[in-house]
Image: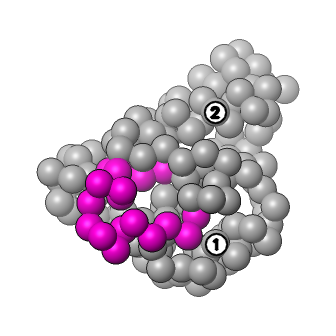
Amino acid sequence: MTRVLVLQGPNLNMLGTREPEIYGRQTLDEIHAMIAAHAAVLGLTVAFFQSNHEGALIDRIQTRDYDASVVNGAGLTHTSVALRDALLAVDRPFWEVHLSDPWKRDAFRQVNFLHDIATESIVGQGARGYLLALDAIAARFGAGPGDHA
């Protein structure tokens, strides 16, 4: 069974109350429940990790106990060469997801240290972006409904 790490960056623990006009009203726990249900249908195993600390995110990436990851680097997307280097170092494909579309927001969000190394970037789709990433992972790794190999 394909193992997927869903990595959530700083402040995503505040979803549901943090700028709901931008990020929506779903909490991170609600989004994770939705991801887990969709992953089960696709025959994927998921593990979740959220931290407000760059080093904790990097340590989790470096465990290498997953086949692919879905990464929402949040604000670190725009600032962290270290996060980029960790994702490159582990040699695992990852799908970058952002609830909003950073390209249509503040000028400083135009800097993205992950976009060019991600297998795919899914932005501006809200929580549905995570499900689209899982669909792409399932397609790449040959998983699908009823496939529990």
20 or 147, nearer to the observer: 20
Q: Residue at x 71, y 15 (%)?
A: 146
Which mark identifies residue 136?
2
- Tell me if residue 79 can be seen: yes
The quarter in which the N terminus is drawn is top right
Q: Residue at x 40, y 72 (%)?
A: 75
40 or 129, nearer to the observer: 129
Please name the colour scheme applied to the rendered image. Answer: one colour
Q: Quadrant of residue 148?
A: top right
The kind of secondary structure element at disc 1 is helix
**Quick check: 46 above or below 75?**
above
Residue range corresponding to the magenta coloring: 97-114
Q: Amino acid at mark 2?
A: Ala
Work out how far the residue at label 1 is from the one at label 2, CA to CA, in angstroms.
Answer: 21 Å
Cβ atoms at labels 1 and 2 below 8 Å apart: no
Mark 1, other Cα within 10 Å: few <14 / some 14–19 / many ≥20: many
| Horizontal arrangement in the rendering, residue 143 relative to residue 121 (left or right) | right
User: Does residue 46 show up magenta in the picture?
Assistant: no
Where residue 58 appears, as percent x and y from the top left, is 64, 76
The quarter in which the C terminus is drawn is top right
Where residue 73 appears, as percent x and y from the top left, is 49, 65
Mark 2, other Cα within 10 Å: few <14 / some 14–19 / many ≥20: some
- Tell me if residue 63 can be seen: no
Q: Residue at x 68, y 36 (%)?
A: 137
Residue position marked by numbered label 1 in the rendering: 84
Q: Amino acid at mark 1?
A: Arg
